Image: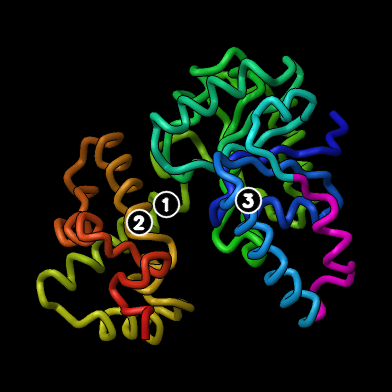
Amino acid sequence: MDIKKIGIVGAGTMGTGIAQVAASSGFEVILHDVGQEYLERALKTMDKSLAKLIEKGKITEPKEAILGRIKTTTDLQDFKNIGLVVEAVFENFEIKKKVLTELDKILTQEAILTSNTSSISITRLASLTSRPQKFMGMHFMNPVPLMTLVELIKGLATSQETFDTVKSIAEKMGKVPVEASDFPGFISNRILMPMINEAVYALLEGVGTVEAIDTVMKLGMNHPMGPLALADLIGLDVCLDIMEVLHEGFKDTKYRPCPLLRKMVDAGYLGRKAGRGFYDYTK
């Protein structure tokens, strides 16, 4: 399939990043969200991000040309003639179910539908649609404009043609696609999230302070960012959602979310986006 236009549902951090990368790679983009204010915020975020990349010499095309390839909408009906759609809404099955079933009715039967889910079963999501052979996972990493990895996940019914098409599009976006099997958390979050969860347990049990835990992992394990700072960047609510999926999917207590993680989410301490997580971002 020769896909020139990509639809993205969800103008949050991930959807905004995917839209920017797709447009920077020459694709026409339609970005959807439920409110115009979210779309305006996304456009401002992309404008700033592109300006920084151009300043550093990583992009040579004028940002006006890139942004000119992005259209925004609050109406999913505008997706009816799009060849590929990336769903990038909240990591919540019921929300994804609502969006995917609606999209499935709007898209042509030839269109490919993908999910940026970071942990939910692709086979389960595909079963919500009438096109399981044309459904798969396309899991980008945050921040999308800077991280080159994309996990590609087949559902039980995903066709090889669909996989090859999505892989080709990922490569055109300058990404390195890696195939992962359809298990909870795939590869990335099955390894990453338990590490973050264990770091929260270490904090809860007084093994070390926030700073000490992050410093050990940065200087001792050569991680660019400590696990607690990374959790703040990802969003503690997202980390909790993924741990819940792992715990439910494997029925193994080693994936039990740390009570402190749950308590912080309940308190609204969600990380950078909330101004407070394991670190204080209001200072």
**Which residue in the protein does label 1 denote?**
189
The question of residue 59 being in magenta is answered with yes
- Disc 2 is placed on an element classified as helix
Secondary structure, mark 1, is: helix
Q: CA distance from mark 3 to mark 2?
A: 29 Å
Magenta stretch: residue 105 in it? no
**Residue 232 position within the rendered picture, expressed as x and y whole percent measured from the top left:** 37, 68
Q: Which residue appears at 47% of the width and 48% of the height?
A: 187
Residue 232 got which mark? none
Q: Amino acid at mark 3?
A: Leu
Q: Nearer the viewer, residue 105 or 37?
A: 37
Q: Is residue 142 left or right of residue 237?
A: right
Q: Is residue 232 above or below residue 188?
A: below
Residue type of the residue flagged with mark 2: Met
- Which part of the image, by quadrant, shows the N terminus? top right
- Mark 3 vs mark 1, foreground winner is 3
| Residue ID for mark 2 | 193
Above or below for 240 versus 6:
below
Q: Which residues are magenta?
A: 57-71
Question: Furthest residue to the left?
Answer: 205
Colouring mode (rainbow / by chain / secondary structure / one colour): rainbow
Q: Position of 139 compared to 281: left or right?
A: right
Q: Which residue occupies 58% across, 42% down?
A: 33
> Residue 178 location in percent, x, y?
62, 48
State which mark lies toward you, 3 or 2: 3
- Return the disc, 3 or 2, that comes first in the chain's sequence: 3
Amino acid type assigned to the residue bearing label 1 in the image:
Asn
Task: Quote the CA–CA distance across marks 3 and 1.
Answer: 28 Å
Disc 2 + disc 1, Cβ < 8 Å: yes
Along the polypeptide, which appears first: circle 3 or circle 1? Answer: 3
The residue to which callout 3 is attached is 39
Residue 151 in sight: no
